[in-house]
Amino acid sequence: MTKHLVCPHCNSTNRVPKDKLNGNVELSCGKCHKALFNERPAALSKTGLNMQIAKSDVPVVVDFWAPWCGPCQMMATEYAKACALVEPNARLVKVDTEAHPDVGTQHNIRSIPTLAIFKGGREVARISGARSAPELVQWINSQIS
């Protein structure tokens, strides 16, 4: 059985054997050859986010943030820590709503930071406000299992 993973660098869809997701194997994109997971949240544009949501078989956790937001800046390191603990069971990404305001509008983002989890192409959970890494990991795991 295979899972579809969208490369956060080139947006191509990769088929990966399910058993390789749970191993300690470094997974690389078949097109651009960059790592599919690198224990850091990928910064995405509207196109990249839409591809991740529509094509990825692993849950996609999105941090909607802006550079001028103090709580967003405080949570950035915690989100990165959570990413290292959750991947490859979920893909953690960030979208700068200042640089991509249409994405915030598309997903009805009213405050930042807002985190949303997408599975099977649809949103399944959302929280707002800064969180610690342990809180993020607990929330993510409770929503994706």
Image (cartoon, rainbow, N blue to C red):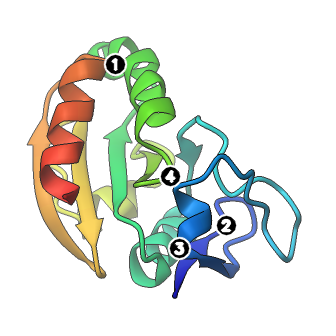
Depth check, front residue: 10 or 65: 10
* Residue at the (18%, 24%) spot, across then down: 135
Query: Which callout, 4 or 3, points to the residue nearer the camera?
Result: 3
Q: Is residue 10 left or right of residue 16?
A: right
- Residue type of the residue flagged with mark 3: Lys
Residue 141 on image: x %, y %: 22, 45
Depth check, front residue: 141 or 63: 141
User: How far is the residue under mark 1 from the one under mark 3?
Assistant: 31 Å
Compared to residue 28, the image places residue 99 above or below, namely above
Q: Which residue is mark 3?
A: 18
User: How far is the residue under mark 4 from the one under mark 2?
Assistant: 13 Å
- Residue type of the residue flagged with mark 4: Pro
Instruction: Tell me the element at label 4.
Output: loop
- Residue type of the residue flagged with mark 2: Cys
Instruction: Tell me the element at label 3.
Output: helix
Judge the density around disc 4: few (<14), some (14-19), many (≥20) Cα neighbours within 10 Å: many
Residue 34's image quarter?
A: bottom right
